[in-house]
């Protein structure tokens, strides 16, 4: 299946290319679906590939289709698919674990040894992403949308899943005092998830008023702009700290270190954002008996995210700042890099227009 796709060739070299995934065959396998992609959200990892060619030790070694936050419309179904039909609107999970390895067998699908996560250069040959006009997927990746949910909002299921998995990694947040540093799209959707999970108080921190306005709309009780109020967290350091749980979603080493002062002894710090090397004062971590936990992607949380969006339990509208047409992909990526004006930038691939 050949379609036009958004392909990253090198840092700041993004092209709309005719593309055929070598893993797609001309005929659908019995368990597969053909899908017209509708909307795709530009993620922080997409921006790392676009601006820098990767992150950490992960580098693009060949042209790669970007994107993993997508919704679409089913155009054809394989012979063994009985629960889906052409014309249905779906959110598409980019998580494709093998189901056979030791981690899949333990229920840790996000750590699969043979994971084929869309738009990832973690393995070579790279796993191409979903920013293309058409896509062949496994039926298990498809999550049906309610008629009331737009295809644009459905594309938020992936970043919401990241936030829900982070909450799961933290343990119960019910009745807890919670700090969120970094209020980009994942941080904002995380805040909405924390509200659903019963957090008693949520304080959101960022350097951008736009991000903090969104955080407030998504359920934060209090917001602090550390760019204009650099000592804004100081009152929370009283008596060894007041926050039971901290979620670090900015990828900033400085933000992570600042959390050590304001998290209460035996509190939990969950790191979400992709950052570089960190120099944590381990004596503080040890002295306060803090727990530092990582969180990586998601799997089963995707179905929960779609249910929350389908039922209106989480409203993602404040997170989407711009929707740009597919043929203006370079503009969309540049816009997404500008945090002074953009939150979640989505690309409209036009599938809903075709369906109409």
Image: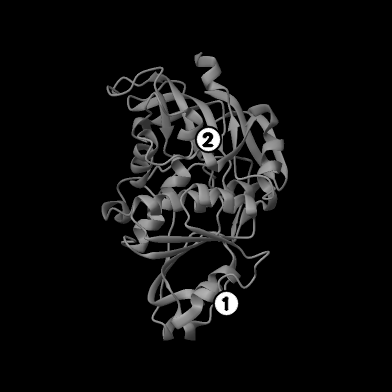
Identity of the residue drawn at 42% across and 20% down: 27
* Circle count: 2
Q: Secondary structure at mark 1?
A: loop
Left or right: where 221 falls relative to 48: left
Q: Where does residue 329 sit, x and y in percent of width and height?
A: 67, 34
Q: Which callout, 1 or 2, points at the residue further toward the start of the chain?
A: 2
The part of the image, by quadrant, that contains residue 28 is: top left
Residue 79 visible in this rendered orientation of the protein: yes
Left or right: where 38 falls relative to 335: left
Q: Crowding at label 2, few (<14), some or many (≥20) Cα neighbours within 10 Å?
A: many
Q: Which mark is residue 279?
A: 1
Q: Is residue 350 above or below residue 123?
A: above
Q: How is the image coloured?
A: one colour
Read off the residue under disc 2: 130
Q: Secondary structure at mark 2?
A: loop
The part of the image, by quadrant, that contains residue 312 is: top left
């Amino acid at each position: 299946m050949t379609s036009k796709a958004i392909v990253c060739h090198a840092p700041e070299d993004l092209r709309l290319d005719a593309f055929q995934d070598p893993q797609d065959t001309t005929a659908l396998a019995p368990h597969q679906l053909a899908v017209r992609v509708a909307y795709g959200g530009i993620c922080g990892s997409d921006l790392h590939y676009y601006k820098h060619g990767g992150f950490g030790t992960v580098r693009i070694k060949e042209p790669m289709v970007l994107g993993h936050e997508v919704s679409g419309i089913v155009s054809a179904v394989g012979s063994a698919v009985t629960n889906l039909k052409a014309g249905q609107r779906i959110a598409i999970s980019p998580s494709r674990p093998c189901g056979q390895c030791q981690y899949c067998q333990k229920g840790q699908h996000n750590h699969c040894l043979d994971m084929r996560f869309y738009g990832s250069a973690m393995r070579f040959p790279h796993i191409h992403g979903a920013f293309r006009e058409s896509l062949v997927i496994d039926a298990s990746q498809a999550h049906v949308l309610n008629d009331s949910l737009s295809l644009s909002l459905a594309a938020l299921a992936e970043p919401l899943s990241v936030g829900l998995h982070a909450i799961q990694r933290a343990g119960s947040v019910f009745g807890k005092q919670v700090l969120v540093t970094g209020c980009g799209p994942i941080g904002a959707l995380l805040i909405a998830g924390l509200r659903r999970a019963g957090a008693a108080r949520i304080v959101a921190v960022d350097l951008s008023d736009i991000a903090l306005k969104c955080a407030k709309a998504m359920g934060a009780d209090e917001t602090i702009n550390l760019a204009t109020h650099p000592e804004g967290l100081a009152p929370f350091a009283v008596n060894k700290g007041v926050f039971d749980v901290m979620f670090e979603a900015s990828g900033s080493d400085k933000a992570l270190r600042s959390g050590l002062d304001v998290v209460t002894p035996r509190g939990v710090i969950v790191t979400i954002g992709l950052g570089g090397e960190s120099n944590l004062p381990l004596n503080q971590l040890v002295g306060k008996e803090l727990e530092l936990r990582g969180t990586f992607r998601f799997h089963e949380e995707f179905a929960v995210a779609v249910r929350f969006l389908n039922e209106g339990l989480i409203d993602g509208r404040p997170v989407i700042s711009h929707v740009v047409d597919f043929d203006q992909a370079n503009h969309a990526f540049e816009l997404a890099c500008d945090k002074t004006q953009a939150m979640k930038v989505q690309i409209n691939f036009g599938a809903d227009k075709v369906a109409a």
